[in-house]
Amino acid sequence: MDIATNPTTPEGNPELADAAPMPHAPPVIQRADYKPLAWRVPTTHLDFQLGLEATIVTATLEIERNPDAAPSSELRLNGDSLTAQSVTVDGAPAQWRMDGPDLLLSLSGDRHTVTIVTDIDPGANTQLMGLYASGGMLCTQCEAEGFRRITFFPDRPDVLSVYTVRMAADKATFPILMCNGNRTAEGQGADGTHWAEWHDPWPKPSYLFALVAGNLVANSKPFTTASGRMVECNVWVRREDLARTDHALESLHRSMKWDEDVFGREYDLDLYNIVAVSDFNMGAMENKGLNVFNTKYVLADPDTATDADFDAVEGVIAHEYFHNWSGNRITCRDWFQLSLKEGFTVLRDQLFSQDMRGESVKRIEDVRILRAAQFPEDAGPLAHPIRPDSYREISNFYTATVYNKGAEVIRMMRSMVGESRFRAGTDLYFDRHDGEAATCEDFVRAIEDGADIDLTQFRRWYSQAGTPRVAVSQAVDGDTLTLTLMQTAPATPGQPDKLPMPIPLRVAVHSRQSGALGSEQLIVLNEAEQSFILPLTGADPVVSINRGFTAPVVIERALVREDLVFLAAQDNDPFARSEALQELAVGHLIGAAGGTLSNADRQGGEAAIIGAFRSSLNDSALDDAMRGELMVLPSETYLFEAMAAGERKADPGAIHAAREALKGAIGAALKDELLALHARTSALRLDDPAGRGARKVKSIALGFLAAGDPECAGDLAAVQYDTADNMTDRQGALMVLCGLDHPARAAKLAAFHDRYKDNALVVDKWFTLQALSLHPDVIEHVRALAQHSDFTMRNPNRVRSLHMAFAGNPKGFHAANGEGYRMVADVILALDPINPQTAARFVPALGRWRRIEPGRAAMMKAELERIMAAGNLSRDTYEQVSRSLEG
Ligand code: TRP
Ligand code: ZN
C-alpha cells in the first residue's frame, strides 16, 4: 500500500495530515528538536527495599539550573507506568502534576533536593525493561528508556549524574547485592535482611544504571592494567553454571589487554562485574562496572556450546567491555546518536576478533551478516540512515543499520587514513570528549582533526539511507586499464534523491593469461561517475575490486565465468576469493530462479561452480576455516535482494528451488571429495589445534552430501552424532538429520532433548534446529513445538529459538500458501502485550512484501493489515507495522 492510499495514518491521508494524530499513533520524536535540559542532576541517591513482588524505591536528586540551557521553572521527570507515593522538594510537599506518564515539577529556586517514592512490582514486569525478576533473582535493563520504569527521572542520555545506591533485601533469597561502581558499606538488618551501599564515582546517564540481587556465585580472576592497577574481574552465574564461565572470563581479560594495546584505553574502576541472566531482550548491556548478559553470551563449554557459540561469547564480552570507553566515558547526547557508541563499538569488537582468530575469516563472516541483515533493511520500508532523523520508539532503532553499517562507515574512515592516523583520530576523540554526551558530528570532527582528512562529503554516509550501487566498466589502452565507476543510491522512505558519497575501494588488476597478480591500491570514488587509470600486469586483465570489502556497497558488473573462477582460485586477497565465488553463485542462481537460463548456461554455470568448489577442496594451501568460508553459498535473503532489482520481484520459491538444486549438484558431483573431507576431519580430536576449522568444514560437507545423496548423508550424520565429543559436531549432525526423512531423525532428536533437558541454552538449540530445518513438514513441526511443555512466550531466548528461527527459514516462512506468514503474525499479536520490544523484531520479515512476487506480497501485506486492525498495539509494534505498510 502506498502512502497516499493508506487512510489509517495521518501520513497516508493528506486530509488528516493536519488533524490530531490517531489516538493510537504514538508521537514522532525529531532529531532536529533536541534541546538541552534546563536542569542538571549532579548527584542521585537511590534507596531500594527489594522484593520480587514489591520493591520500594526512594530517589533523592540534587538538582541545579543548567547555565547552558534556556531557563525553565519546570522539570520533566520521565515515568513509565509509575505512580508517585510521595514527592517532596527540599523536604516540603512539592508542586507537581502528571503529564501522561511523566511527572512535572514546578521549581522556584536555583538548586533543590527532590525526593520521590515509588513502588514497583518486578515480578509482573514481562517487558524485561526496568527492574524485573528472572529465575528468582532481580536485575535491571535501563537502555534505552527503562530507568523511567524504576523511578521518575530525566531519563535522557545527556543528563549525567553521580550515583550512590543503597539496597536492602532478604539475605537468604538475595545473598548477593550489586550495583555500579564499588561497594562502600554493608550490614545486617532486621528479620533476616541485609543491605549494601554502592558508589559509582563516574558520572553517568540513567541508561547505564544497573542493579542485581540474587543467589549467585562468581568465577574471579584479577587483571593488572598497563599502569599497574589491579582490577577484580568476576563472572556471576547460578551455581550450576559456574563450570561454563572460564571462556567468558578469559575473553574479558583478552579484551582489556587488547584495548590497551590497540586503542590505548585502560579500565577505570577496581571492579568489573558480569552477571548472566536467562531472561534478556538483547545480547548484553554495558552498564558501568556491572554488565548484565544474556546467558547465551556467557556460558560455554565444548559439550554444550559450538565453536561459533564460543566466538559469539568472546565477541559480545569484548563489545560490552569496549563500551566502557566508547559509550560510557563518552556517551550519546541523544538517541539519534546511537551509532556514535554502537557503530564504533561494533568496529572495535570486529577488529578485536580479527586479531584473535584471523582477519580474513572474520571479515567474510561480518560481511555475510551485513548482507543478510542490513542490506535487506536498507532496501525496505524500514530503511534509515545510521543517524536517524525521527522515531516513535527508540528500541526499534537498535538495528543492523545503526550497529553494522555504522561500523562499516567508521571502518571506511580507517581505510582511507590508515591505521596510525585513525588511531590519532580516536585518541583525539577520547581526549576531547571524555566525560561528555557527544554527537556523531563530534566523532567525525575528531577524526578529521586527529587524522588530518577532510570528511565534509563523507558526512553524507550519516544522513543518507540505502545501499549505494557501483557500476563498473573497464577499457584497456596500451599498458593501462581505465576503470570507470558510476555510483547511484536507491530512493528510501523520505529520501527520494541521493548525493554521491566517497566510496573507498581497494583494487588490483590481475592477468588471467599469465596469472600475474597486480599490486593493490586504494581508490576513492567521490563523484557520481569517475575514471581511474590502473597499471596492467598482463593480458586478459581481471579487476579485483572492493577487496576486503572496504565499502558497504553493491558492485554491479558482469564478469565472464572464467574471470570469476580465476579470482576464486588465485586472488591473493582471501576475501576477494570468497567474493568471486559468491558472485559466480549469485549470477547463476538468480538466472536459474528467474527461468532465464538456457540449458547450456545452466550446465555451464553449475560446472564452473563445481569446478571452483573442487579447487578449494583440493587446495592444500588453504586452512579448513577458510575452506569452509569458500563453501558457503549466498543466503536466500541475499539472493532475494539480488533478484529484486527495479521492476523485478524476488520469487522465494524459485530461489529456494534453484539453491537446493545447486547444492544437490555439488553434493552429487563432488561426493567422493566431500566424503574424503568428512573422513579426514572426523579423524581429528577436539583438542587438535586444527580441530576448529575441521569441525566447520565437516558439517558443511555433510550438508552438501545430504543434498546430493540424502540416505548416505543421513547414515553418516547418525554416526557423526553418536561419536561426537563436542557440541559443534553434534549440532552439525543433527541439523542435517533434521532436514531429512531419515529413520535416525526422530531418535537423535529425542536423545538430544533427553540429554540436555536441564540446560535451557541447549534446549533452545533443539527448538532452533527443528524450526530452521529443510523438512517438508517444518510448519507442522513448529506448530507442535509451540505447544511443547518447554515452550514459553515469557522467555525471549526461547521465543527466538523457535519463532525467530522459523521466520528466518525461507522455506517455511515463505510457504506458498501463506501459512508461514500467518504464524509469524500470530506470534506478533500474542507477544506484543507481553514483550513489545521482542514482538516488534518479527515485523521486518513481513515488511519485505514489496520486493516479493505479487502472490506472496498480497498475503504478507494482509497479515500486516490484520496486525494493525487488532488495535491496542505497543509503540514498538505500531511503529514497525505502520512503516512497513507505508514505506
Ligand atoms: N547497548 C546494548 C549493546 O549493544 C544493547 C542493549 C542491550 C539494548 N539491552 C537492550 C538495547 C535493551 C535496547 C534495549 O551492547
Ligand atoms: Zn553495544
Image: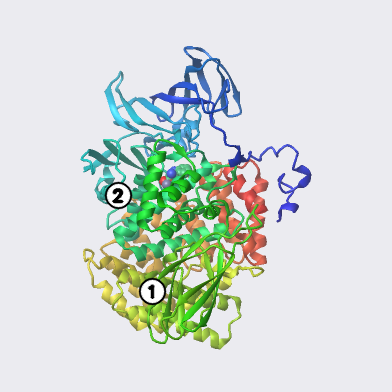
Against 556, residue 132 (above or below) is above
Q: Residue at x 28, y 65 (%)?
A: 692
Number of numbered tags placed on the structure image? 2
Q: Amino acid at mark 2?
A: Ser
Is residue 797 found left or right of 168 in the rendered image?
right
> Disc 2 on helix, strand or loop?
helix
Query: Which one is nearer the viewer's eye here, 716 or 511?
Result: 511
Q: Amino acid at mark 1?
A: Ser
Q: Residue at x 49, y 84 (%)?
A: 478
Numbered mark located on residue 251 in the image: none
Q: Quadrant of residue 823?
A: bottom right
Numbered mark located on residue 519 in the image: 1
Is residue 128 found left or right of 761 in the rendered image?
right
Name the residue carrying label 2: 255
Is residue 490 found left or right of 748 in the rendered image?
right
Inspect this view and state whether residue 246 appears. yes
Disc 2 beta carbon < 8 A from ligand 1? no
Taking the view exactly as shown, the residue that stands out farthest to the right is 15
